[in-house]
Amino acid sequence: MLRPLLCAPVPCWPVCRALCLAGALLLAGCAGSAPPAPWPGRLLGLLPADALLLGEQHDAAEHQRLQRQAVQWLAARGQLAAVVIEMAEHGHGTRGLPRQASEAQARAALQWNDAAWPWSSYGPVVMAAVAAGAPVLGGNLPRSRLRAAMDDAAWDRHLPAPALQRQYDALRQGHCGLLPEAQWVPMARMQIARDASLARTVQQALHPGQSVLLLTGNGHVLRRLGVPTHWPASLVSKVVMMQTQSARDAIDDDDADMVITTPALPPRDACAVLRRSRSGMAAPPALSGASPAATIAPRP
């Protein structure tokens, strides 16, 4: 049995000063807590779980790298039931493809929209799951149903009033104040409907003794606002959110079970980009199938 080191002063003679220095560095850990385990081993503390939600900032390449490692780690342990992704529509998936399937086959099976979600960013994640024999399932609400969701007032009653207001605030902030007030309600309905689609896809993929891994934007995994609000209490889910050091807002303790912080991204005026993109745009950005900016890190 391993025993804890005793933290005690060690007399250092000149002849063994180097050894004493090494010992002092070793004993220094006694004064504080142990460093966290390397990723993705940190996920071990969240298991077992029916669903493991891994939120990202869509423009952070490091987050897609960590997603791929999570897929490989769960698969190696025999605990990966399926991978559900926001980046493809519900009804499309790689189930039935062989492990040696090509990228072209996987893209065709998922009906991949490279304009909305660059394959160069997400392809390695998808192919890691395919190579492991785990199905990758599109979970996003199909484009053909987005308009109906925006017109469906039933979604207004899904969240408590404070949470619904948080959705409105997130949409306004995420679109840099450029979203007309008249669009807050229909856009929030669409966001909630997309959460419901992701939740339904995860539930359809559940398998005893394994976890379904959901990969999506941070806004979709918020415990009190997103996908988890569409599940029965009996479904055990854990939420991991990834953010960069340049993220503007802290993540509330109630939002996630674990927060992973990655290096800051290069400075970028996202609002200026959004203004330019909207100057010739007739429809809301989310109708393209990609997440609106608010899904990256909405705040209350």
Image (spheres, helix red, strand yellow):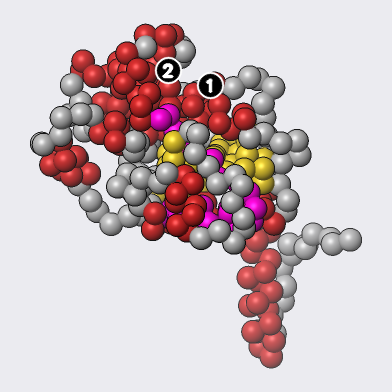
Pinpoint residue 206: horizontal percent, then vertical percent. 67, 34
Q: Quick one: 271 or 264, which is closer to the camera?
A: 271
- Does 19 appear in magenta? no
User: What residue do we see at 45% from left, 49% from top?
Assistant: 108
Amino acid beneath label 2:
Ala
Instruction: Work out whether 151 lies above or below 114.
Output: above
- Does 139 appear in magenta? yes
User: What residue do we see at 55% from left, 46% from top?
Assistant: 94
Pinpoint residue 199: horizontal percent, then vertical percent. 54, 28
- Magenta stretch bounds: 121-142
Name which of mark 1 and mark 2 comes first in the sequence: 2
Disc 2 residue crowd, few under 14, some 14–19, many 20+, Cα 10 Å: some
Amino acid beneath label 1:
Thr
Instruction: Work out whether 215 lies above or below 149.
Output: below
Q: Quick one: 205 or 214, which is closer to the camera?
A: 205
The residue wearing badge 1 is: 229
Q: Secondary structure at mark 1?
A: helix
The residue wearing badge 2 is: 163
The mark total stands at 2
CA gap between label 1 and label 2 equals: 11 Å
User: What residue do we see at 62% from left, 30% from top?
Assistant: 204
Q: Are marks 1 and 2 in contact (CB under 8 Å)?
A: yes
Pinpoint residue 48: horizontal percent, then vertical percent. 72, 39
Q: Quadrant of residue 213?
A: top right
Q: Quick one: 243 or 183, which is closer to the camera?
A: 183
